[in-house]
Image (cartoon, rainbow, N blue to C red):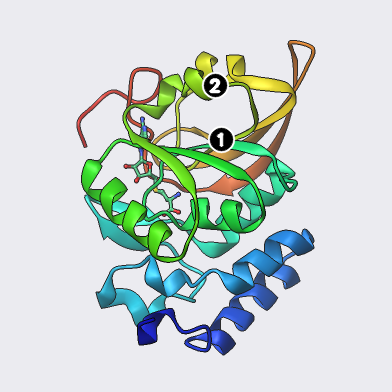
């Protein structure tokens, strides 16, 4: 195993990152344990390895970012992940969020629109032994083949909630998605009960745009 994969590397930085997240109100112990274990430095560009445990988003190529650790924590906590939960992630990016979900014991499906990012995420997940089902494509239409999902997490911001994602939620399932304009968004946490939806909003987040059929239109 390479030096980078050794558990000891950045252990104290990882602990500090998790303590900061805890101090900001995140309580899910299974999630905090996963964030303490998953080596975020393996998911960032080598240029930024020294900043891997700062509470900030970092570039991962293709003008995309690995999300801020606190944002990952808030979104994942809102998903109410249990061991064996079936979770669909839209926006694989670096693979870090997928690794956190897999470490928590979820069965993870993930979609990324850039093949370059997906290939690198797959390599990282494989290296660490996480079994995640992934594909390259437009996640705004979901992944009907494996639906329904106990949770769907969208890691890029949409102008509106894509209907296919609501359709692909299981009864009792939760969709976590940033909604807003290009500059600022709020997290919508939507629970499905017998084809009715209950929405709670968490304010003040900033994401890259969700681009696709049911998201923002464009090539960027
Ligand atoms: N979850 C990622 C991680 O842990 O690194 C962070 C992802 S980044 C904030 C958002 C990702 O969503 C980008 O990689 C972007 O290419 C992807 N994306 C945007 N629109 C998409 C779409 N329609 N389908 C799939 N992925 C999309």
Q: Do residues under tags 2 and 1 come within 8 Å of each other at their CB atoms?
A: yes
Name the residue nearer the viewer: 194 or 159. 194
The answer to whether any part of residue 162 appears in the image is no
Q: Residue at 45%, 26% (x, y): give it.
A: 159
Q: What residue is pinned by disc 1? A: 177
Q: Where is residue 31 shown, x and y percent of the image?
A: 69, 60
Asked whether, in this view, residue 91 is left or right of residue 36, the answer is: left
Which element is circle 1 on?
A: strand
Q: Residue at 38%, 33% (x, y): give it.
A: 210
Q: Residue 193 is drawn in which quadrant?
A: top right
Quadrant containing ligand 1 reads top left
Given this view, does label 2 or label 1 mark the residue nearer the observer?
2
Marker disc for residue 165: 2
Name the residue nearer the viewer: 38 or 194. 38
Residue 30 sits above or below residue 41 on the image: above
Q: Where is residue 131 shown, x and y percent of the image?
A: 49, 50
Asked whether, in this view, residue 180 is left or right of residue 114, the answer is: right
Asked whether, in this view, residue 195 is left or right of residue 51, the answer is: right
Marker disc for residue 25: none
Quadrant occupied by the N terminus: bottom left
Q: Where is residue 102 shown, x and y percent of the image?
A: 58, 53
Name the residue nearer the viewer: 208 or 83. 83
Residue 22 sits above or below residue 92 on the image: below
Quadrant occupied by the C terminus: top left
Q: Where is residue 209 shown, x and y percent of the image?
A: 37, 37
* Local crowd size for mark 2, using a 10 Å CA cut-off: few (<14), some (14–19), many (≥20): many
Q: Residue 4 is drawn in which quadrant?
A: bottom left
Residue 144 sits above or below residue 81 on the image: above
Q: Is mark 2 within 8 Å of ligand 1?
A: no
Asked whether, in this view, residue 16 is left or right of residue 143, the answer is: right
Which element is circle 2 on?
A: helix
Mark 1 or mark 2, which is nearer the start of the sequence?
Answer: 2
């Amino acid at each position: 195993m390479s030096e980078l994969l050794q558990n000891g590397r950045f252990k104290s930085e990882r602990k500090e990152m998790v303590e900061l997240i805890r101090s900001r109100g995140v309580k899910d112990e299974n999630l905090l344990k996963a964030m303490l274990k998953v080596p975020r430095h393996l998911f960032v560009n080598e240029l930024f390895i020294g900043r891997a445990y700062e509470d900030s988003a970092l570039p991962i190529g293709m003008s995309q970012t690995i999300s801020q650790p606190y944002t990952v924590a808030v979104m994942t906590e809102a998903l109410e992940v249990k061991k064996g939960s079936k979770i669909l992630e839209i926006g694989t990016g670096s693979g870090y969020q997928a690794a956190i979900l897999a470490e928590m014991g979820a069965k993870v499906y993930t979609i990324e629109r850039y093949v370059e990012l997906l290939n690198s995420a797959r390599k990282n997940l494989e290296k660490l032994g996480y079994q995640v089902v992934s594909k390259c494509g437009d996640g705004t239409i979901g992944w009907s083949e494996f639906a329904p999902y106990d949770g769907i997490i969208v890691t890029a911001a949409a102008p509106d909630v894509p209907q296919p994602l609501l359709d692909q939620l299981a009864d009792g399932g939760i969709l976590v998605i940033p909604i807003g304009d290009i500059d600022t968004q709020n997290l919508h946490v939507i629970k499905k009960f017998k084809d009715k939806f209950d929405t709670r909003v968490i304010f003040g987040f900033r994401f890259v745009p969700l681009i696709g059929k049911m998201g923002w239109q464009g090539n960027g």
